[in-house]
Amino acid sequence: MSTPNDQRLSFREKFAYGLGDTASNFYFQAFNQFLAYYYIDVLGIKDSAAGTLMAFIPSVVALLNPVIGMIADRTDTRWGKFRPWILWGALPYGILGYVMFANPGFGVHGTLVYAYITYTLTLIAYAAINTPYGALMGVMSPSSDDRTSLSSYRFACAFTGTLLIGWLVPWMKDFLIPAGGSPADGFRNTMAIFAVISVAMFLYTFANTRERVKSPPSQGSSIGPDLRDLLANKPWLVLFFVAFLNLTNVGLRSGAGIFYFKYCVGRETSLGTFNLVGFICFILGALSTKLFTRYFSRRSLMIGLTIVNALGIGLCYFVDPHNLPLLYALNILGSFAAGPTPAIVWSLYADTADYGEWKFGRRATGLVFSATVLAQKVGLAIGGAMIGWLCSYSGYVANAEQTPRALHSINLLFSLLPGSFALLAGLAIVFYRLDEPTVKLMERELAARKAAVAPPVSN
């Protein structure tokens, strides 16, 4: 039986896995940063209706994530449990994301119905490919060190996708408007390009990754014990709430950015450069993960870095929107501090899957990751919905000069509200008790268990 150190991942495999999250973020970040704006300012959907749409659909579809995770745990093909979902889901994912921005022009009520249908189908396709993709990290290597490194590649690539969306879409959506066309045409043509690239990236991920960690051979297929073990997995429960709080922060901050720069700063085009600088710092932070983890435990890093990120976001509330140098400085601080956190927290999710197997004798990697994604999707939905709801409450009027009350609400959406959720996430991690010595102990004992039941090798 091989030990964790015998199965180190190559650069090519880590990079291939990472590209899968670049592909995911082409849609994920487009939705986070521009969907509320697209629905309200471009398509003309009422802000309160857009808020309800962006809360209801992701929250309902999120319930599918654990179902997909449990089905993926029970998938058995020559390619493994999780990789086939990437192969089968790539093309539908690409097509539906494009259709979502196609805007056939059905009128006020027809446009809202079309938005409900296409947003639902796209999020289902996203869940069907991204949930197994996330779980794949937990079975590519049994080593927590390797998984932390893999997670670093994943999120460096993920936020390259974030960088490209945040930097290029504000420019491309205008540049790609055809003669006599509308802003909606610019969005449609922009998403067509990202759809094609994302499908190609997912196929590359499928072709260049492998699954190595297997479930215990004596494990049955009953769903009930998996759910029972998950709810008894205390480290995972803490991370479940952390995921909800973090993604509520992301949904608020990302979606409010274009409103903040359009109405508070008064220079919508400046958002692209602001995002570019922030995302570069985020990637630099992600690439520094290994350096940070050399000197600090992952738990301590998550607490400290998340609180610094919260301060970088929340303090923007007290800055004059026209003081761009200070806004940039806070953006750089918060973004760099946030950079290592996704890689760290996703490696912690993989540790909780190991913990479940170590503690209860059953492994449900897909369920662990997919139930976490459920918390993320609900948090993201709440964050995005709060934009529409608070805009409606404050008297926001699309494409018009805003009242002081509406401007104050936009400032809150961009600063204090997301900063508060980030701060709560950092404080919640205090309750995560799975430390590094225990993780190493689990690795050794799980490897010993598997060696004890492995069939003898004939000479």
Image: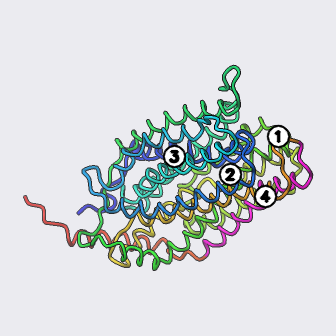
Distance from disc 1 to disc 2, alpha carbons, whole Å, reads 29 Å
Q: Residue 86, how many percent across, how many down?
A: 39, 47
Q: Name the residue under label 1.
A: 399
Mark closer to the chain start, 4 or 1: 4
Q: Give the range drawn in magenta.
A: 401-430
Q: Is 313 left or right of 131, judged from the image as shown?
A: right
- Tell me the distance, in whole angstroms, between the alpha carbons under discs 4 and 1: 16 Å
Amino acid marked by disc 1: Asn
Which of these two is toward me, 309 or 219?
Answer: 219
Kind of element beneath mark 4: helix
- The CA span between labels 4 and 2 is 25 Å
In the visual, does 400 lie left or right of 202? right
Compared to residue 78, the image places residue 104 above or below, namely: above
Q: Residue furthest right?
A: 404
Say few, some or many: other residues with alpha carbon within 10 Å of mark 3 (under 14 / 14 to 19 / 20 or more): many
**Element carrying mark 1:** loop
Q: Name the residue under label 3.
A: 24
According to the picture, the residue beneath numbered tag 4 turns out to be 390
The residue labelled by disc 2 is 335
Which residue is at the far left? 459
> Residue 213's image quarter?
bottom left
Q: In the image, residue 209 lies at what x, y percent?
A: 36, 47
Amino acid at dot 4: Leu
Q: How far apart are marks 1 and 3 (CA)?
A: 30 Å
